[in-house]
Amino acid sequence: LEEQNIYVKFSFHARGENLNITIINNTVLSREEEDRINDKIHHAWQFKSMADAMSEILDDTEGAGLGIASIIMMLKNMGVSDRDSLSVKKTPSETHSMIRIPYKKPGFGKPNPSIIEEL
C-alpha cells in the first residue's frame, strides 16, 4: 500500500462529552457507493436486532451492510440513540468515517438489559 501511496489514518478525540473516532483513507467513494452506505446507515437504525438486520439487508451485492448494522446495534446497546453517531462522507481526495460515542452520558457503560438476559 505504501508503494501505491494508499493510506488509512485513525484519530481518537475526546470532545466535550463525546469520544470521536475518525477513520480517513485516500480511496474515494463513488457517489453511488456513498449513497448506498448512507442508505444502509439510515435503515440500520430501524432494526431491533441483528436477526432483523440479517433478514432485511442480506443481498448478493458486495458489502451488504452487516458491518454497518453490527456497529449500529453495538451503539444502540451502549445507549446511543443519536442517528448522527455514525457517518461516512467523502471529499475530493479522501473518505471520512466517524463514530461518536457519548461516554459521559448517565448510565453509559451499563449493558443493555437484553444483553444481560442473553447472558
Image: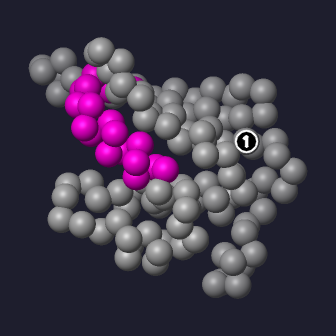
| Colouring convention used in this rendered image of the protein | one colour
Instruction: Give yes or no for residue 10 being in the magenta stretch.
Output: no
Q: Residue 86: x, y in percent?
A: 53, 42
User: Would you identify the image quadrant in which residue 20 lies?
Assistant: top right
Task: Classify 10 Å Cα crowding around label 1: few (below 14), some (14-19), many (20 and above).
Answer: many
Residue 33 included in the magenta stretch of the image: yes
**Residue in the image at 34% along x and 39% along y:** 35
Asked if residue 53 is positioned above or below residue 10 in the image, the reply reads below
Q: Position of residue 51 (x, y in %)?
A: 46, 78
Q: Is residue 103 above or below residue 54?
A: above
Q: Which amino acid type is marked by label 1?
A: Pro
- Residue 102 vs residue 88: left or right? right
Which residues fall within the magenta stretch? Answer: 24-42
Name the residue located 26 percent from the left edge and 54 percent from the top edge: 63
At a point 28% along the width and 22% down the height, the residue shown is 26
Counting labels gives: 1
Mark yes or no: residue 71 visible. no
- Is residue 43 toward the left or the right of residue 115 in the image? left
Residue located beneath label 1 in the image: 102
Magenta: main secondary structure equals helix
In the image, farthest residue toward the right: 106
